[in-house]
């Protein structure tokens, strides 16, 4: 009887809304600043097969203990305007916060699919994050999979965004609703890929401060760990989550450049503008009928993928992954990682290095299979079907009511946002029938009656959001995977259901295969020096009379936080011959990178220089001083 009463009321309410409509908009721009180039393909000249090209990180779930902090931070640190706090809308704001996580899961898969299809097999990995609290009860995040333990050329942080105040949903503020998507993304890497910007390549404008700060800390922590011979344990939370925790960090003098401008060759962080993109209406209309179509790919992802491929083609992959490969090899054997860092040519160690690289390659393939399963479960499974139904309902809502008054449209719009929470918390018993058997008419009917529909309300407020999503995705992630390990003339198959089990087997295989090899420990007291620093540093490589010589790696950090890193050839503890050097002052943003000829610790000869905010240049140096232009053909590059 109650259900029969609800339907007429829904019809009456819809009629009232339609009859009383007036002007209102929810429009976005036609396309992103990044345009697709279908003729562009990636060029990979790297020597190693143990690295991924791209890791995609995104917010996937929220830990129960962090839900309140996430809601509060989302409301306090808004993007696109200030939120007028009102207790009456706080519950609606929380539902919008939930929808960001829900939709980020879905739209991240679009980016993954595009890059997976464009790049070589097993070279794109997914890294879903759980949003949680750290030991100081600050908002942070950590990866749910081990994808970030694999060396990667670049890492992408991706999510979508909606403005917290539901009363502004139809205004100019950013939102992700129906055919409109506001993407946020950051592209970063190891500091050696782009020393002048600590490895930060690109950032959405609101996240620049957080992304720069995190890249700075990551670079410092990695150098410090190496100097202290300790394990590098810096876990970089998602830049969006760091932004939510700290707000907009105003960091002066960051070298920046606009997307697509003529200064593209300048060494600076490319700033992606905050874009509210309206996807193609004809494609949107077929979203639930044809799962192969993807309007987000057409209007944003293809262009963004082209920008990522361009970045991959413009960097040295071996240089980018050199230190990550050292860390990955150290997990099997610390001596092996040290030997790799020292660039040892010892025949005794060559087989161990080959074995270690083969096992890291196998781990990458295992994680690639996990990523593919996660994609299938999220984008192509029931979750994806539910998301497409929800987005299609949102789209039809906007199409039918774009001319309605914003206030009149608000309750209907927010009801469908609540559906995001419902899909996300899909195993809640109160809504299982609704989620698994709903039609578009059910969606439209129920969305008009948010206040009266307790099932949606309870679902949207569920405190088991993260847990339930993991329950849904667990079968996709924890399935048995077999990977062939090829090493020299041998081949062995490793089968496991989760990564820890797989790693235990790879570690056991390494220990069985190389247990008879002798160790090679380099002198921890061997010194590396630089003329401008009084502090004595450490050299990883061969040593004579307490000073480094031949090829290897050296670094110095003084008491003020200035540091010098060097990869290449040294003599009497100082750079001599061909090498690459990072010089960083604690008083300046970024760092300066030199590559080419060195003498007595300083650039001397033909040297390529990268400085923050300037174009890279090849110059003649004399005793560390720029002496004029040089022939780029004479530049000697380092073989990482």
Image (cartoon, grey):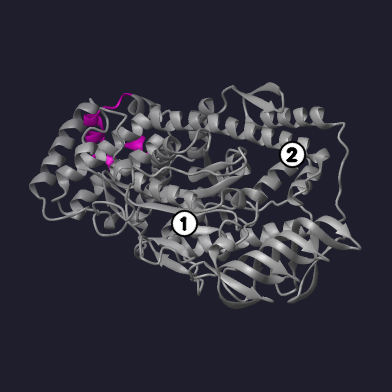
Residue tagged 2? 353
Camera-side residue of 475 and 410: 475
- Nearest to viewer (mark 1 / mark 2): 2
Q: Position of residue 230 (x, y in %)?
A: 77, 53
Query: Which residue is found at the position 59% from the left and 22% from the top?
Result: 480
Tell which residue pokes out farthest to the right in this image: 545
x and y percentages locating residue 182 in the rendered image: 34, 52
Where residue 107 appears, x then y in whole percent?
38, 41
Residue 435: image quadrant is: top left
Camera-nearest residue between 28 and 300: 300
Asked if the stretch drawn in magenta spans residue 132, the answer is no
- Please name the residue shown 52% across and 57% down the image: 242
Whichever of callouts 1 and 2 sits on the residue coming sooner in the sequence is: 1
Placement of the N terminus among the 4 image quadrants? top left
Q: State the extent of the magenta-drawn residues as a range.
A: 437-457
| SS for callout 1 | helix
């Amino acid at each position: 009887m109650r259900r029969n009463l609800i339907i007429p009321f829904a019809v009456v309410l819809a009629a009232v809304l339609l009859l009383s409509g007036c002007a209102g908009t929810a429009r976005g721009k036609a396309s992103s600043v990044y345009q697709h180039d279908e003729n562009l393909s990636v060029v990979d000249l790297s020597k190693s097969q143990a690295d991924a090209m791209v890791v995609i990180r995104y917010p996937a779930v929220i830990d129960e203990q962090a839900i309140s902090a996430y809601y509060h931070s989302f409301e306090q640190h808004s993007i696109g305007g200030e939120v007028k706090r009102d207790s009456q809308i706080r519950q609606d704001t929380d539902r919008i916060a939930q929808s960001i996580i829900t939709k980020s899961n879905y739209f991240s898969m679009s980016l993954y699919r595009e890059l997976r299809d464009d790049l070589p097999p097993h070279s794109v990995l997914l890294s879903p994050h759980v949003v949680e609290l750290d030991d100081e009860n600050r908002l942070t995040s950590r990866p749910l999979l081990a994808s970030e333990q694999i060396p990667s050329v670049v890492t992408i942080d991706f999510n979508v965004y909606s403005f917290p105040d539901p009363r502004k949903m139809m205004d100019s503020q950013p939102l992700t609703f129906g055919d409109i998507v506001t993407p946020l993304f950051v592209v970063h890497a190891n500091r050696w890929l782009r020393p002048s910007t600590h490895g930060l390549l690109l950032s959405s404008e609101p996240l620049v401060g957080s992304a720069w700060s995190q890249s700075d800390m990551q670079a410092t922590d990695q150098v410090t760990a190496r100097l202290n011979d300790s394990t590098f344990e810096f876990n970089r939370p998602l830049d969006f989550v760091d932004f939510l925790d700290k707000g907009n960090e105003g960091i002066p003098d960051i070298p920046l450049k606009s997307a697509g401008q003529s200064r593209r060759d300048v060494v600076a962080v490319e700033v992606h503008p905050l874009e509210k993109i309206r996807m193609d209406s004809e494609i949107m209309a077929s979203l639930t009928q044809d799962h192969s179509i993807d309007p987000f790919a057409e209007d944003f992802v293809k262009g963004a993928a082209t920008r990522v491929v361009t970045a991959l083609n413009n960097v040295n992959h071996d240089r980018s992954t050199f230190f990550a490969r050292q860390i990955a090899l150290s997990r099997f054997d610390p001596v092996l990682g040290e030997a790799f860092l020292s660039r040892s040519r010892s025949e005794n160690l060559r087989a161990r290095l080959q074995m270690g690289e083969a096992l890291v390659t196998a781990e990458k393939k295992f994680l690639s299979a996990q990523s593919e399963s996660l994609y299938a479960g999220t984008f192509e499974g029931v979750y994806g079907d539910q998301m497409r139904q929800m987005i299609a309902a949102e789209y039809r809502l906007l199409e039918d009511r774009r001319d309605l008054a914003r206030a009149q449209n608000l309750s209907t719009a927010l009801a469908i946002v609540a559906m995001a929470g419902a899909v996300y918390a899909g195993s809640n018993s109160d809504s299982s029938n609704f989620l698994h058997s709903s039609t578009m008419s059910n969606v439209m009917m129920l969305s008009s009656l948010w206040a009266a529909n307790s099932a949606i309300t309870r679902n949207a407020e569920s405190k088991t959001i993260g847990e339930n999503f993991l329950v849904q995705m667990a079968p996709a992630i924890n399935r048995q995977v077999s990977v062939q390990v090829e090493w020299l003339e041998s081949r062995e198959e490793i089968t496991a259901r989760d990564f820890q089990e797989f790693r235990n087997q790879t570690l056991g295989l390494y220990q069985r295969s190389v247990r008879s090899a002798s160790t090679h420990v380099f002198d921890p007291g061997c010194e590396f020096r630089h003329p401008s620093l009084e502090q004595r540093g450490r050299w990883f490589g061969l040593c004579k009379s307490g000073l480094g010589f031949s090829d290897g790696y050296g670094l110095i950090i003084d008491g003020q936080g200035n540091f010098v890193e060097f990869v290449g050839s040294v003599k009497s503890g100082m750079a001599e011959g061909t090498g690459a050097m990072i010089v960083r002052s604690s008083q300046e943003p970024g760092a300066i990178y030199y590559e080419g000829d060195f003498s007595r610790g300083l650039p001397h000869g033909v040297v390529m220089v990268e400085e923050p905010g300037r174009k890279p240049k090849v110059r003649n140096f004399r005793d560390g001083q720029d002496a004029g232009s040089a022939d780029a053909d004479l530049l000697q590059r380092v073989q990482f």
